[in-house]
Amino acid sequence: MGAARGPIQGYAFTVGAARSLAAQSPAMAKTPLQAAQLEGSADEVEAAFYEALQTGDIEALMRCWADEDDIVCVHPGGPRVVGPGAIRATFEAMFSGGAVAAQPERLRKIESVASAVHHLIEKVEVQTPRGQRSAWVIATNVYHKTPQGWRLVAHHASPGTPSDIQEVSEAPPVLH
């Protein structure tokens, strides 16, 4: 599995490279995320997360994550990545190929006092042999309210298809 790649170029990473980066940098397991104060809402942290993806800014991206050992990230077609050091390593490997042109669309939210779940479609611009194309990723982002403010605790992204821009939901009842 060491050479597995996620299916979306620019949003893909090499699992072996990520493991190697994590093993080389054991100090990454706990970084001073407490110093990063992102005030506001889960929506604002999500905006900061996608801006960091679009600019390839690993420090800004990691400030969006909670400083917890059990945070989790699943990239499209990739394994479950657990902990800040491993998550950082996968995004560093991803950013080695440049920033990720991911644009969140079609957001659906469930919010409570201390948690928020955002389900969305990511439109990712990718370079192909035929030129620039749009790819689709189905993502779920989970946020918790922490002492440092709202933070991302889970990002799960699955490869999508053009049909994923369609949405299936319950039909509203028809009143006559």
Image (cartoon, rainbow, N blue to C red):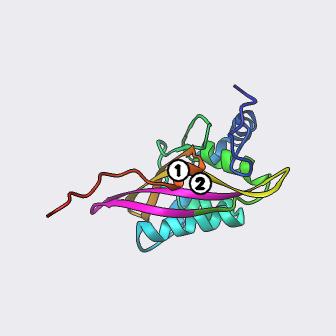
Q: Residues in magenta?
A: 104-125
Viewer-closest of 94 and 125: 125
Return the residue at label 2.
31
Residue 92: which disc?
none
Q: Please, which residue is most extreme toward the top here?
A: 1
Quarter-wise, where is residue 74 in the image? top right
The residue type indicated by label 1 comes to Asp
Badge 1 element: helix
Viewer-closest of 125 and 111: 125
What residue sits 76% from the left and 38% below the top? Answer: 17
Label 2 packing within 10 angstroms: few (<14), some (14-19), many (20+)? few
Q: Is residue 74 above or below residue 171?
A: above
Residue 90 percent coordinates (x, y)? 67, 45
Badge 2 element: loop
Q: Quadrant of the N terminus?
A: top right
Label 1 packing within 10 angstroms: few (<14), some (14-19), many (20+)? few
Viewer-closest of 31 and 79: 79
Q: Please, which residue is most extreme toward the bottom here?
A: 40
The residue type indicated by label 2 comes to Thr
Viewer-closest of 1 and 83: 1
Is 13 a magenta residue? no
Q: Is residue 91 left or right of residue 44?
A: right
Return the residue at label 1.
164
